């Protein structure tokens, strides 16, 4: 009887041991996945914070913004891809470059990072004005200009075209897996071209100092108080998103399968 019990317990151990090992391995994989997600979300938060802070600091000057983005992508791109733009994240998600859970987390992190940058810079600006006792036009925080009545379609199409250029660039950069530095420069220079094209159209409608009508990034537009009503929402949220999807889709259409092997 004792011998039968021993045999039975041996059989149970041989059955359950592989299952326990599989369960442990599954738990480890899930933990690694969750940690990777958290790291990616944090990277997008930090990257977007740095981007918005840089844009505000240089008053949206395209060349300086482009170089700031190159640095940001080099810093956080290895962790999250360095999207730092909700529209580009949606474009990547629609074209199946990233999964849904990651895309949602990125967008939340990007908006929070942009908002935090605005909060910090506003606090610094308020403190500076409190010390001097004045708030001149040059000391105001960089923000969105008032959209000229009757010119909404010009600004909307400028955002759309500029975002297509940026999305085409980041879609190309994402394929440069072996050369992170080149990928960062492609992304940054694509933003430079997009800002120059879109900015050349919208600059003629500017009537205020320290303002812009070109963002190509919904998170930056929100931080700059550019989104308030249906026209501004269409210009700074919808147009960049559509442009990003079109840019990613265009790159996929033109992309040759053997190009990735050469990068």
Image (cartoon, rainbow, N blue to C red):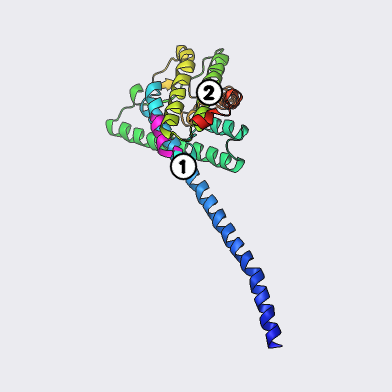
Residue 246: horizontal and vertical position, in percent? 60, 24
Task: From the viewer's perspective, tell me whether residue 127 is left or right of residue 24.
Answer: left
Crowding around mark 1 (Cα neighbors within 10 Å: few <14, some 14 to 19, many 20+) is some
Q: Which residue is mark 1?
A: 79
Of the pair 15 and 202, the residue shown nearer to us: 15
Residue 110 within the segment the image draws in magenta: no
Residue 115 x %, y %:
46, 36
Query: Quarter-wise, where is residue 243 in the image?
Result: top right
Image-quadrant location for residue 102: top right
Residue drawn where x is 49% and y is 13% of the image = 201
- Asked if one can make out residue 213 in the rendered structure from this viewpoint, the answer is no
* Residue 55 in sight from this viewpoint: yes
The stretch in magenta equals 68-77
Whether residues under marks 1 and 2 lie with C-beta atoms below 8 angstroms apart, the answer is no
Pinpoint residue 155: horizontal percent, then vertical percent: 53, 17
Secondary structure at numbered mark 2: helix
**C-alpha distance separating marks 1 and 2:** 23 Å
Q: Nearer the viewer, residue 134 or 188?
A: 188
Residue in the foreground of this view, choosing between 173 and 208: 173
Q: Left or right of 88: which side holds 58?
A: left
Compared to residue 31, the image places residue 83 above or below, namely above
Residue ID for mark 2: 163
């Amino acid at each position: 009887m004792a011998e039968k019990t021993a045999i039975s317990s041996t059989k149970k151990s041989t059955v359950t041991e592989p299952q326990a090992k599989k369960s442990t391995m599954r738990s480890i994989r899930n933990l690694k996945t969750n940690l990777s997600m958290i790291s990616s979300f944090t990277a997008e938060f930090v990257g977007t914070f740095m981007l918005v802070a840089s844009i505000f600091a240089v008053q949206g000057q395209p060349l300086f913004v482009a170089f700031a983005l190159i640095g940001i992508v080099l810093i956080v791109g290895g962790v999250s891809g360095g999207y730092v733009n909700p529209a580009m994240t949606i474009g990547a998600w629609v074209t199946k470059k990233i999964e849904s859970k990651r895309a949602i987390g990125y967008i939340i992190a990007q908006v929070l990072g942009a908002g935090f940058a605005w909060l910090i810079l506003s606090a610094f600006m308020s403190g500076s004005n409190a010390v001097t006792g004045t708030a001149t036009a040059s000391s105001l925080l960089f923000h969105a200009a008032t959209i000229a009545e009757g010119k909404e379609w010009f600004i909307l199409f400028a955002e759309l075209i500029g975002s297509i250029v940026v999305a085409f660039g980041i879609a190309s950069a994402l394929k440069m897996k072996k050369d992170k530095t080149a990928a960062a420069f492609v992304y940054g220079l694509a933003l430079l071209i997009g800002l120059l094209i879109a900015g050349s159209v919208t600059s003629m409608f500017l009537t205020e100092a320290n303002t812009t009508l070109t963002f190509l990034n919904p998170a930056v537009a929100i931080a700059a108080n550019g989104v308030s009503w249906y026209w501004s929402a269409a210009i700074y949220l919808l147009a960049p998103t559509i442009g990003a999807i079109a840019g990613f889709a265009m790159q996929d259409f033109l992309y040759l399968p053997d190009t990735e092997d050469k990068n």
